[in-house]
Image: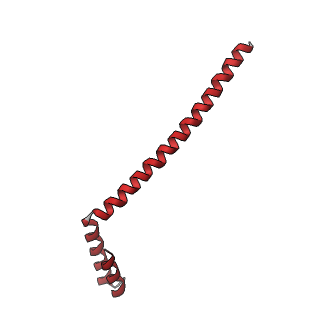
Amino acid sequence: MTDILLVIGQIVVVGVILGVFLGILLLFKYFIINSIIKLFKIKTLHNDPHIDIAALDFAQKRYAKGEISKEEYEEIKKTL
């Protein structure tokens, strides 16, 4: 009887250790993958000329509607 309880206890301990290890591994994987995705998105946003054109077009429309001042529009244009 004690041998069975000892084996069951060992199985439980090994299961807990594996669970903690896998949990840490999944968290590490999650943060690494998210960091890579964020870096890729930032890099592609800055290298895509279509995004700058769309942003400038949007700023022009806002300036034409009077939603932003000329100074704000010039600042946006200079930034893009």
Q: Nearer the viewer, residue 25 or 58?
A: 25
Image coordinates of residue 73 in percent, x first then y, are 33, 82
Quadrant in the picture for the C terminus: bottom left
Quadrant in the picture for the N terminus: top right
Image coordinates of residue 65 in percent, x first then y, are 31, 83
- Does residue 45 lie above or below 56 as drawn? above
Q: Residue at x 35, y 55 (%)?
A: 40
- Does residue 22 lie above or below 4 as drawn? below
Report the residue that reaches farthest toward the right.
2
Q: Residue at x 32, y 83 (%)?
A: 74
Q: Residue at x 34, y 60 (%)?
A: 43
Q: Nearer the viewer, residue 71 or 59?
A: 71
Q: Residue at x 71, y 18 (%)?
A: 5
Looking at the image, can residue 69 be seen? Answer: no
Image coordinates of residue 32 in percent, x first then y, are 45, 48
Could you say which quadrant of the image residue 53 lies in?
A: bottom left
Looking at the image, can residue 27 be seen? Answer: yes
Q: In the picture provided, is 74 more to the left or to the right than 5? A: left
Image coordinates of residue 3 in percent, x first then y, are 71, 13
Q: In the picture provided, is 32 more to the left or to the right than 61? A: right
Report the residue that reaches farthest toward the bottom.
70
- Does residue 44 lie above or below 55 as drawn? above
